[in-house]
Image (tube, rainbow, N blue to C red):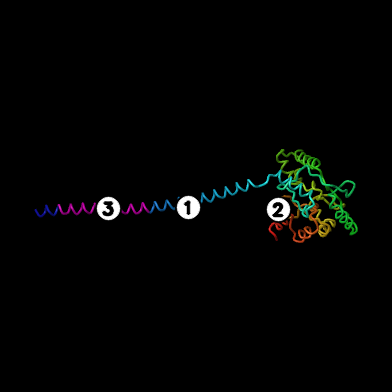
Amino acid sequence: MKKKKMKYRLIKILCIGIIFGALIGMLLMGLSGRARIKEVREECKTTENKLKKENEQLQAEAEKAKVQPSSEAIAKENAEKLASKDDDWSLVLINSESPLDTSYAPSLTKITDDYSVDSRIADDTKKMFQDAADAGMSLNIVSAYCDNETLKESFNNEMLNWIYQGEAPLDAYDKTKQSVALPGTSEHATGLAMDITSSDYLGADDEEENTDEAKWLKANCANYGYILRYPAEKSDITGVGYEPWHFRYVGKTAAKEIMGQGITLEEYLEQQKDGK
């Protein structure tokens, strides 16, 4: 009888132990589940915040794109600034991102029988050539004002030249853009730019910088309102390779600041915008 009672007691204890263990297991699983749920919620919140931030950035970019003027609007505005009598007419930026309306035609004055510039800079330009001659320099004008048709013809001829050398049309187009500005993006259409070399060196390459004429121009051009427009090691800013022969009129005050700091027109205009 005692053995039977003992057996029942052991079974009861065992059952209680099993039930207790199951309860403990369920409790532990519940705690673990709640911890995992919390963890998942935090992950979801982090992802939600990330997506929200990315969405805000996309919306900001979209809004910016809405207010960004079109290239046609920029081209028209640049033409209006160049034609105006505002003090900053000579600082209008012309490049691939800031084009000029192809209908723009400045009032011109001849510097030589073959070349003309904007009439407003004629006196300063003539004086620069006269002072250079007095200093024993022999300057040669390669290019000055060019109308849109001339620029288009120049671009097409250079592109054909690459094609004749075996380049595919698209490759020829890309190579041409590196040395010849697309119509509507050339400073020569403003009447404010000139390509000037030494009469003794007509190579139009980097070696031009070693001529006495190029050295004189670099040292003195700012006195006449000109700058070396495409300096060495600045192509990432100007978008144009080094051209020791290309000079652009910006006015004497700006020219002296630009040449004095060794910067580009792009950098100077950015400084002005930032109020520096």
* Numbered circle sitting on residue 46: 1
* Numbered circle sitting on residue 237: 2
Residue 253 sits above or below residue 102 on the image:
below
Q: Nearer the viewer, mark 2 or mark 1?
A: 1
Expressed as whole percent of the image width and height from the top left, the position of residue 6 reads 13, 54
Category of crowding for the residue at label 1, using alpha-carbon neighbours closer than 10 angstroms: few (below 14), some (14–19), many (at least 20):
few
Residue 73 sits above or below residue 16 on the image:
above
Q: Residue furthest front?
A: 85
Residue range corresponding to the magenta coloring = 8-34
Proximity of marks 2 and 1: CB atoms separated by less than 8 Å: no
Of 107 and 248, which appears nearest the observer?
A: 107
Which quadrant would residue 131 be assigned to in this image? bottom right
Expressed as whole percent of the image width and height from the top left, the position of residue 267 reads 71, 56
- CA distance for labels 2 and 1: 39 Å
> Image check: 13 left or right of 242?
left
Identify the mark nearer the N-term, 2 or 1.
Answer: 1
What residue sits right under mark 3 in the picture? 23
- CA distance for labels 3 and 2: 73 Å
Category of crowding for the residue at label 2, using alpha-carbon neighbours closer than 10 angstroms: few (below 14), some (14–19), many (at least 20):
some
Of 20 and 176, which appears nearest the observer?
A: 20
